[in-house]
Image (cartoon, rainbow, N blue to C red):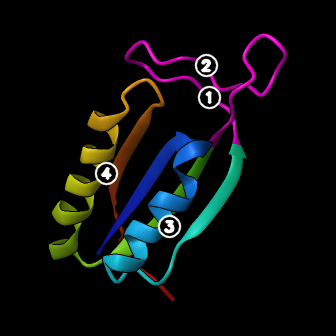
Amino acid sequence: MKAIFIAFDQAYYERIIEMLQLSNCRGFTGWQEVQGRGTNGGEPHYATHAWPSIASAIMTVVDDNRVDGILEKLHEMDVATPKLGLRAFVLPVERTI
C-alpha cells in the first residue's frame, strides 16, 4: 500500500475530494488550512495580509496499483491551472492497524 500526500491551493479542495470518490478512494484525512510554499517557484500560501492565499492538504492510503491513475488525474489538474499549485508525494505504508 502507498500513502499519497497531496498539498494544493484551497480552490482545489472539492475537486480533489470528488476525484478521490470517483477513484474509489473512500478513506482520506484532510486539512483544510495549511501554510507553505512550493519549491518550484510557487507562490506562498500563508493566509496573511501579504500572502492571502491558503493551502489545503489531503492524505489517502491506496493499493499500489491505484497510485498511477490518481497521480495522472492530479497532474491534469495542475497542468490546467499551474498558478494555483498542486503537489503530490507517494510514501510507502509499512503497516496499518
Q: Residue furthest right?
A: 49
Helix or strand or loop: what does disc 1 sit on?
Answer: loop
Q: Residues within 10 Å of mark 3 (few under 14, many from 20)?
A: some
- Which residue, given by chain and number where applicable, does mark 2 sit on? 44
Identify the amino acid type marked 4.
Answer: Leu
Q: Position of residue 84 (x, y in %)?
A: 48, 30
Q: Residue furthest bottom?
A: 97
CA separation in Å, label 3 and label 4: 11 Å
Please name the residue shown 78% across and 28% down the image.
47
Depicted 72 relative to depicted 52: above or below: below
Please name the residue shown 56% across and 55% down the image.
13
Of labels 1 and 4, earlier in sequence is: 1
Say the numbered circle drawn on residue 80.
none
Of labels 2 and 1, earlier in sequence is: 1
Whether tag 1 and tag 4 are in contact, CB under 8 A, the answer is: no
Q: Position of residue 85 (x, y in %)?
A: 45, 31
Identify the amino acid type marked 2.
Answer: Pro
Helix or strand or loop: what does disc 3 sit on?
Answer: helix
Identify the amino acid type marked 1.
Answer: Gly
Of labels 3 and 4, earlier in sequence is: 3
Depicted 75 relative to depicted 1: above or below: above
Please name the residue shown 36% across and 28% down the image.
82
- Which residue, given by chain and number where applicable, does mark 4 sit on? 74
Magenta span covers which residues? 34-55
- Which residue, given by chain and number where applicable, does mark 3 sit on? 17
CA separation in Å, label 2 and label 1: 6 Å
- Which residue, given by chain and number where applicable, does mark 1 sit on? 36
Q: Is residue 36 left or right of residue 15?
A: right
